[in-house]
């Protein structure tokens, strides 16, 4: 594999950098067991999961959230 510097990557157009990030993320997500969780992160995830289970409401529709954010911005 050839080596690519960060400065070379930053020269790529934004759309290409986004595709690269997506490909990297997909490669990580394909093997979730390889991501090590710190005890602190595990506690945070457990806490959030428990909060979700207590109130599993679907939240707001994306269209409503988007409209609200665009009004504020």
Image: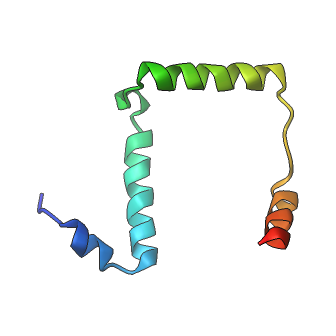
At a point 41% along the width and 59% down the height, the residue shown is 21
Question: At x 88% / y 59%, what residue is drawn?
Answer: 64
Is 7 displayed left or right of 70 in the figure?
left
**Left or right of residue 3: residue 51:** right
Quadrant assignment for the C terminus: bottom right
- Quadrant of the image occupied by residue 70: bottom right
Question: Measured along the vertical axis of the image, is residue 13 above or below residue 28?
Answer: below
Residue 38 percent across, percent down from the top left: 41, 24
Name the one closer to the observer, 18 or 68: 68
- Give how far across and how far down residue 32 sits, in percent: 43, 32
Residue nearer the viewer, 19 or 8: 8
Q: Residue at x 85, y 67 (%)?
A: 67
Residue that appears at 44% across and 77% down: 14
Q: Position of residue 12 (x, y in %)?
A: 33, 78
- Coloring scheme of the render? rainbow
Q: Is residue 8 left or right of residue 32?
A: left
State which quarter of the image contains the N terminus. Answer: bottom left
């Amino acid at each position: 594999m050839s080596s690519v510097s960060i400065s070379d990557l930053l020269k790529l157009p934004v759309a290409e950098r986004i595709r690269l990030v997506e490909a990297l993320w997909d490669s990580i997500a394909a093997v979730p067991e390889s991501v090590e969780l710190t005890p602190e992160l595990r506690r945070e995830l457990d806490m959030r999961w428990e909060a979700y289970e207590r109130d599993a409401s679907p939240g707001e529709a994306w269209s409503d959230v988007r409209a609200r954010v665009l009004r504020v911005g």
